[in-house]
Amino acid sequence: MGDLLLIIVILGVTYATGSIIEKNHFKKIRQREIALVKKPVVTFGKKLTTSKKIKNVELVTGEAAISGDYFKTFVSAFRNFFGGRMVSFESIMDRARREAVLRMREKAKNADIIVNLRLETAMLNTEDNNNNQLPKVSVIAYGTAITYER
Amino acid sequence: MILTNIESVPGMKITGHCGMVSGSTVRAKNFVKDFGAGLKNIVGGELKSYTELLEEARREAIDRMTQQAQKLGANAIINVRLATSAITAGAAEVYAYGTAVKVQPIEG
């Protein structure tokens, strides 16, 4: 009985912390994306044609490691059993990718355009580690920042 | 050293190829930070120590690749790619590879 109560308390607490952190994170991401809306990022590089003189070319990267929480893991265990969309994990992946891309763009604030954006994902936890099934996702975003001569 | 992940260096022309260069590194954080990240993992949020880990690993992999290119006498690396793999829990491998080239500015 005591164990069950403890699990319920942990689930309640982690549900609260997880959703507050996620809500605030999404809010921040949206604000930063709006601030950067005039700086284009494209996923192609070959077909870049410009008549402007180029001042600087540079590789820029951004990293982010985001973790899930206990509640999400608990809920997704059911979802995994029955199949279907795992919404709680989709939001973690989304946050990690958008955060990594934003960090990359913020590093290249003086650049005019970032071409050939690529995303690389690494899961830091492995399947054979049974005590550590909570998801951690880390993303590296990289691209070429181009600055034009003014 | 100019690094790009496209197949050219905008504003410059390629005068010679030096071949493929690569650099890799496997890094881990100390057990205290791993423990801290484990606690953070329960409540949710960003794992700052692992973000740092990734940053360090990426920097080191690119540094090693750059050193190799310098030895070959190149002054730019084009088509840089980064690959990651999770070799074990709490460690990250970053592998950077690209083509070392000699470039010079286009005149006129």
Image (tube, coloured by chain):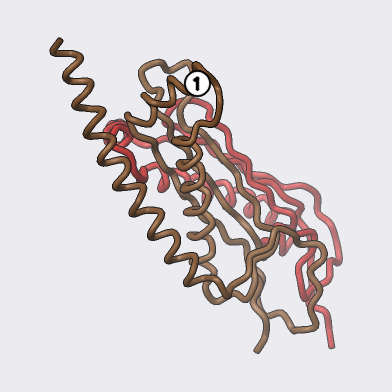
Chain colours: A brown, B red
Report the number of numbered marks.
1
Between residue A82 and residue A58, name the one nearer to us.
Answer: A82
* Chain label for disc 1: A
Residue A78 lies left or right of residue A2; in this view the side is: right
Residue A130 lies left or right of residue B32; in this view the side is: right
Q: Position of residue B51 (x, y in %)?
A: 42, 46
SS of the residue at dot 1?
Answer: helix
Residue flagged by tag 1: what amino acid is it? Asn
Q: Is residue B11 above or below residue B59?
A: below
Residue drawn at x 31%, y 47% as measured from the top left: A21
**Residue A120 falls in image quadrant:** top right
Mark yes or no: residue A90 visible. yes
Mark yes or no: residue B34 visible. no
Residue drawn at x 57%, y 33% as measured from the top left: B85
Q: Position of residue A97 (x, y in %)?
A: 53, 49
Residue with the mark numbered 1: A80
Q: Quarter of the image containing the N terminus of chain A? A: top left
Farthest residue to the left: give it. Answer: A2
Residue drawn at x 43%, y 59% as measured from the top left: A29
Q: Give neighbour class at mark 1: few <14, some 14-19, many 20+ (Cα, 10 Å).
A: few
